[in-house]
Amino acid sequence: MASKPGIPKGTRDFSPVEMAKRNYIFDTIRSVYALYGFQQIETPAMENLSTLMGKYGEEGDKLLFKILNSGNFMAGVEFDELQEGQTNKLAARFCEKGLRYDLTVPFARYVVQHRDELTLPFKRYQIQPVWRADRPQKGRYREFYQCDADVVGSDSLLNEVELIQIIDTVFSKFGIRVCIKMNNRKILTGIAEIIGAADKIVDITVAIDKLDKIGLENVNTELAACGIAQEAIDKLQPIICMKGNNDEKLAVMRETLSESEIGLKGIDECFFVLKTLEKLALRNQVELDLTLARGLNYYTGCIFEVKALDVEIGSITGGGRYDNLTGIFGMPGLSGVGISFGADRIFDVLNQLDLYPEETGVGTDLMFVNFGEREAAFSLAAMTKIRMAGIRCEIFPDSAKMKKQMSYANARNIPFVAIVGEDEMKEGKIMLKDMVKGEQRLVTPEELISCVKS
């Protein structure tokens, strides 16, 4: 017997019920983005590798899925080159394209490519899949959807405020309690300066961003392995272990970074955003977290990450300010800020907490039983009027036994069944059966519409 086919690790199939839930997620996020004036775009699943490489740091570049060139991709490659085993060099020869790692870099490419068509500031949202050659684990997939919103062409911190409002609104609609964590890359740069390790800012941010995953001791070991002096690591400890409310943390850091101009600017930016949010009655907590680093190299200002409070899972939303992402594509000086909802992790959280509305899984409202050609023709005419009233209905395609047709309706959780035989056709009426209550009555098409809608 042939073995069952499978799918790659880190990917998933979704059933009709699961797709109804996922569409609830996408539709909710889409509706909130629209409320705040964002417009939708889409970009290709694959980009030129020259667009993607070097934008995510060394760690991110390793996780790019590369696509082999068409035809004889090994043309021109010498045997000696293969024996040397320089995989990165060979990949550059074999592959000109790759699957997108996120939606932000393709968006930056889009902005530069279509600059003459855009009105700035440009507020876009994008809901599409991305791919990462990561090790699959709980809550981490190789193929997953991101739901991004970005504003480019504006330096205003009101954009950061608005994006946090969007996060708060979305998770309030889902009924998920979250903590919205915020930091600023300028603060992290200032910290690197005052501990005497300004040239190690990337290593520091990559290491402390793993604090929740690997713990303080392992973070310190990683910092030392990157060549950061023990004295600098010791100075870092009270900062990354700091407790207190947002005002207390800002006050301590303002004093700690008093000699760092860029660090103080980061403090001021966080202060403005947090104080503005205090007046907006958010339903979820916003916390200044000095260990939040977000490993992507293009962030330059405020950064965000969202943690679910009632489920053990990684970040379910993230984002931040990037001052010059488009500069790498020949359009310097265009500032932007954005967020990304992790739809797949949100899907898992909603499943674990059972927070989907009851109507989410509802598909067909009404099924017509099929007794034969004449009855089916009568039913199809009635269904045209019923569908125009917004009721989702279908007819069983075969004139099978009644038991089989009713079993199908039960298996599909269809709440109403319409029965049309000789007597019903003579009267121009339909026998409507309520599958939940087990009751049935003879109704006109207009009465049927009213019954099903109510």
Image (cartoon, grey):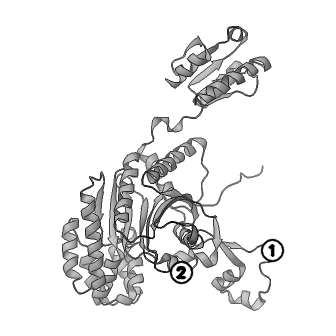
Along the line of sight, the residue nearer the viewer: 41 or 246 = 41
| Tag 2: amino acid | Ile
Residue 143 x/y as whole percent: 58, 61
Q: Is residue 369 above or below residue 127?
A: above
Residue 121 x/y as whole percent: 45, 66
Dot 1 falls on a residue whose secondary structure is loop
Tag 2 residue: 328
Q: CA distance from mark 1 to mark 2?
A: 31 Å
Tag 1 residue: 71
Residue occupying the point 81% across, 77% down = 72
Residue 360 x/y as whole percent: 50, 39
Label 1 neighbourhood size at 10 Å, few (<14), some (14-19), many (20+)? Answer: few
> Quadrant location of residue 226?
bottom left
Q: Is residue 429 left or right of residue 260?
A: right
Along the line of sight, the residue nearer the viewer: 214 or 318 = 318
Residue occupying the point 28% across, 59% down = 277
Q: Is residue 209 left or right of residue 141?
A: left
Residue 204 x/y as whole percent: 38, 81
Residue occupying the point 29% across, 53% down = 282
Circle 1 or circle 2, nearest the eye? 2
Residue occupying the point 39% across, 78% down = 205
